[in-house]
Amino acid sequence: MPKKSRMPTTQLRFVRYSGELGELRRASRRSTGCNFNVWLGRNENSSDFSEPKVTIKPSSGFSCVVTRNRARRRTRGCIMELREEFEPGLWYLIEFKPGVESENYQLLVNELKETLKRVRTCNGNHLLL
């Protein structure tokens, strides 16, 4: 029986820590939502433009480690559902806020999708960084 061909999916590279986060925050575009802040910048230090870099960061205000880690897992799940929305060669910093751990999951996915669209556009025009 022949194998079914699978559609290629976008590979994401999650970055756990980098000293360049402050520079990315200063030199990039930012969009805010109820549960997420998203910064978008060009990945200039890397010669590999085949995959987008994604960094997930909690904002301050989480009461304990358990809720922060639950929110991180839910945010990572939203990102994996929306992996086709991320453009190669760009670096995304996604900061999640307290309350993500108890919010409806599908609402989180929709909000992150809209926030990603807003950070890439300005007055309805697609931005090329």
Image: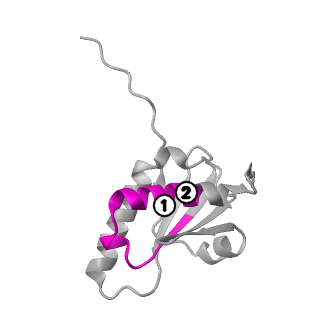
Residue 58: assigned label:
none
User: Residue 1, located in which quarter of the rendered image?
Assistant: top left
Q: Position of residue 110 (x, y in %)?
A: 46, 55
Closest to the observer, 104 or 46: 104
Residue marked by disc 1: 111
Return the residue nearer the eye: 33 or 5: 33
Q: Is residue 119 magenta?
A: no
Secondary structure type for disc 2: helix
- Report x, y in % for residue 79: 44, 55
Compared to 98, does 114 lie above or below? above
Give the residues in magenta: 93-116
The secondary structure that dominates the magenta segment is: helix
Residue 114 bears which disc, if any?
2
| 47 with respect to 111 (left or right) | right
Task: Name the amino acid, label 2.
Answer: Glu
Give the SS element for disc 1. Answer: helix
Tell me which amino acid carries mark 1. Glu
Callout 1–callout 2 Cβ contact below 8 Å: yes
Q: Dot 1 surroundings within 10 Å: few (below 14), some, or many (20 or more)?
A: some
Residue 110 is inside the magenta segment: yes
The one nearer the camera, 117 or 8, is 117
Tell me residue 53's x, y (percent): 54, 57
Q: Position of residue 111 (x, y in %)?
A: 48, 60
Q: CA distance from mark 1 to mark 2?
A: 5 Å
Vertical placement of 87 versus 66: above or below? above
**Residue 113 position (above or below residue 24):** above
Disc 2 crowd, CA 10 A, few/some/many (<14, 14-19, 20+):
some
